[in-house]
Amino acid sequence: MIDLSKNDGLWTVTLNRPDKANSLTAAMLRDLAEIAESAHQARALILTGAGKVFSAGADLDEARAGLAKSDLWERLSGAIAGLPCLTVAALNGTLAGGAMGMALACDLRIAVPTAKFFYPVMKLGFLPQPSDPARMAALIGPARTKLILMAGQKITADEAHGFGLIDRIVPPEDLIDTARALTADSCAARPEVAAGIARLCGKQIA
């Protein structure tokens, strides 16, 4: 349910469970974390999904059984955030719940116009993953973070772009090509140069 392709240093990771809105199981989170932990050799990484939803968050049955509180979410987002290469979340549709963490951990986020963004932890009675509020607030500020996490608001792509939660809105047919274009310079650069620039931009590389 997690597909990985490698092409000249560009790793493309695809959530491939479209019949379940790419909701994440523990096995999928482990696979994603293992890929991210091994991606230090990649020149760039794109994270996307199959179908019309990026991810609905945790699989509901597994969430009720404890997945919502699993440390796998932090393991995954921490691994992505610590990569020395450029990471791009190419959001093919709505991003919800705990799946927000992996996108927040990426360097760049692009999304299709129909994407929605929400993180209904207050309504569901769970705490967000520990690093998610801080990463979100760094992008959009504390008040807008509370709008999403505490007021439970569903944000449109236009609002997300205005807030700074996503960097570009891209037509669906251009999404992956745009993500690849964004990674082109990083893929062509020497890894030590790319990592050095990432550090100068404030990235904490593991």
Image: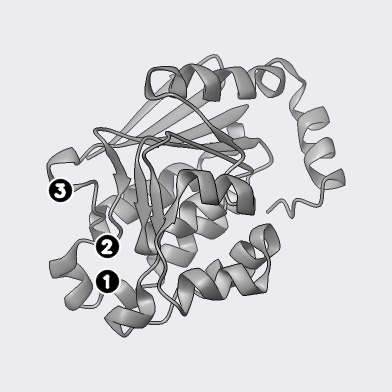
Q: Which residue corresponds to mark 2?
A: 58
Left or right: residue 158 compared with residue 3 = right
Q: What residue type is labelled 3?
A: Lys
x 50%, y 50%: residue: 103
Q: What residue type is labelled 1?
A: Leu
- Callout 1 crowding tier (Cα within 10 Å): few <14, some 14–19, many ≥20: some
Q: Distance between the residues labelled 1 and 3?
A: 16 Å
**Looking at the image, which is closer to me, 80 or 129?**
129
Residue 53 drawn above or below residue 152: above
Q: What residue type is labelled 2?
A: Ala
- Callout 2 crowding tier (Cα within 10 Å): few <14, some 14–19, many ≥20: many
Q: Are marks 1 and 3 in contact (CB under 8 Å)?
A: no
Left or right: residue 162 compared with residue 154 = right
Is any part of residue 32 visible from this angle? Answer: yes
Q: Do the residues labelled 3 and 2 touch (CB within 8 Å)?
A: no
Q: Which residue corresponds to mark 1?
A: 67
User: Image quadrant of residue 13?
Assistant: top left
Q: In which quarter of the image is the N terminus?
A: top left
**Looking at the image, which is closer to me, 116 or 119?**
116
Which SS class for mark 2?
A: loop
| Picture disc at residue 125 | none
Q: Distance between the residues labelled 3 and 2?
A: 10 Å
User: Image quadrant of residue 25?
Assistant: bottom left
Specify the farthest residue to the right: 200
User: Image quadrant of residue 136?
Assistant: bottom right
